Amino acid sequence: MLAYSRTKSIGVQMQGPGRRVVSGILEDEMYGMECQIAVSWPELVIESVQARMKRFTTTRCPRAMEVFTLAEGWKLDHELDGRIKKEIGRNGCRHMAILMVDCCRSLARAEFTRELRSALEKDPTLDKSEFVTLFFERYPTLKSYLNLQ
Amino acid sequence: MILDFQANHLTTVENVDKGLFRIISRADDALFSAEISLDVKLPALDIRKAEIAVRRDVLGLVPDLSDAVEKLVGVRVGPGMTKIVRGILAGTQGSDRVAEMVLESMEMLVNALTAPELRKGMELGGEPAKLDIDGPRVFLNNVLIAEPTIKIMADNPRLKDSCAAFQDL
C-alpha cells in the first residue's frame, strides 16, 4: 500500500530578453505549496516572489508567509540555496523553501538548456563539453550554482 | 506564455512488507532523467537495497554509479545521512543531482512515518479553521492543529525551531 507521495512540478518562461519567470507546485499528503518567482536576466537577481501556502498543518503555519518576499533582491549564486533554507525555511516554511530552491535551480537549468538547444540547431555536431565551458565563461556566477552533473 | 522548460519530480513511499518501505523517486527535465529505488527497513531505518537508473543525460556527465550504489546499502535514514550520502554519491566522481534525489527519498520516508502522527494530532488536537488566506468558497485548511498540540510537538528536538510554526515556544 502506498504510504506517501510527493510531486513537484516546475515550469520556466522567458518573458522578453531580460526577464525569466519560474512557477512551481509541491503537493504531498501533508502540504500543498505554490510559488512564482521573477528573475532579471542576465543579472540573475530575484525581482519578485509570489508564494502561497495552499495546504498546511497547524494554525501557526501562516506566520511563515511574512518571510517569503525576503528573497527579493537575492542573487542566483552559490549562497542562494543556503539562504533560502535558512531564512525562508527555518524562519518560515521548510516545504516552501524546498520548492523555491528547486524553482531557482530549474530557472538556471532552463537558461542553459535554451542556449544549448539553440547552439545544437546551428551545429548538430557541437562539442557539448566545450559548450559547457563557454557557457560558464559567459555566466561565471552560474558555475558554482548550476548543477549539471 | 508557453513554457520552454519543465522539471517534474515524483517520489512515492510504499510499505511493501512488514517494516519494509520502498521509496521510488523519479526526476525528469530536458537534460536529465533518473529513477531511484531504495528499500529501507525498520527499526534501524537502514537501506537494504538501492538501485539507480539514469535514463537521460544529454551532456553525458554522470559517471557509472554502480560502485557507489552498493555503498548505499547499510546507510541509515537519520542524523548524519546528508554527509554520508553526499560523500558516497556527490562530487566530481559522482552526481550531485543523484545524491540530492537519494537524500530527498530518505527525507520522504521520514515524512511518511510522520504523516500518521500528524493525522492523529489533527484528529485529537485539531480545531476548525476558516482563514482569510484560504477560501473564500472552498477551504483546503478546514481543520488545523491548534496551539496546545503544537506545543507538545515542539518538544521534539527535530521540530523545535525548525520553522515558523515551532518557533517562540
Image (cartoon, helix red, strand yellow):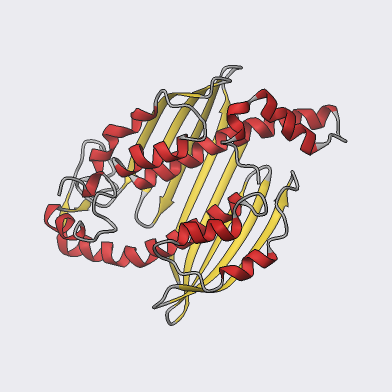
- Residue extending farthest to the right is A125
Q: Position of residue A130 (x, y in %)?
A: 79, 34
**In front of the other: B125 or B82:** B82
Quadrant where the image shows the N terminus of chain B: top right
Is the residue B118 above or below the residue B14 in the image?
above
Figure disc tally:
0
Reply above or below: A27 against B37: above
Q: In the figure, is residue A79 to the left or right of B90?
A: left
Residue at 47% from the left image edge and 66% from the top image edge: B13
A25 up-or-down from B56: above or below: above
Query: Who's the residue at 37% across and 34% down the image?
Result: A51
In percent of the image, x 42 and y 79: which residue is there? Answer: B19
- Asked if residue B96 lies left or right of residue A93, the reply is right
Q: Does residue B134 appear in this view?
A: no
Towards the viewer: A55 or B49: B49
Of all residues shown, which one is farthest toward the top? A17
Residue lying furthest bottom in this view?
B18
Image spot of residue A128 (x, y percent): 79, 37
| Residue B68 in view here | yes
User: Residue B109 falls in which quadrant of the image?
Assistant: bottom left
What residue appears at the point 20 percent right and 46 percent down from the top-left corner? B167
Q: Where is residue A110 in the image (x, y as percent from the top left)?
A: 62, 34
Q: Residue B152, image x and y in percent? A: 16, 60
Observer-nearest residue: B39 or B134? B39
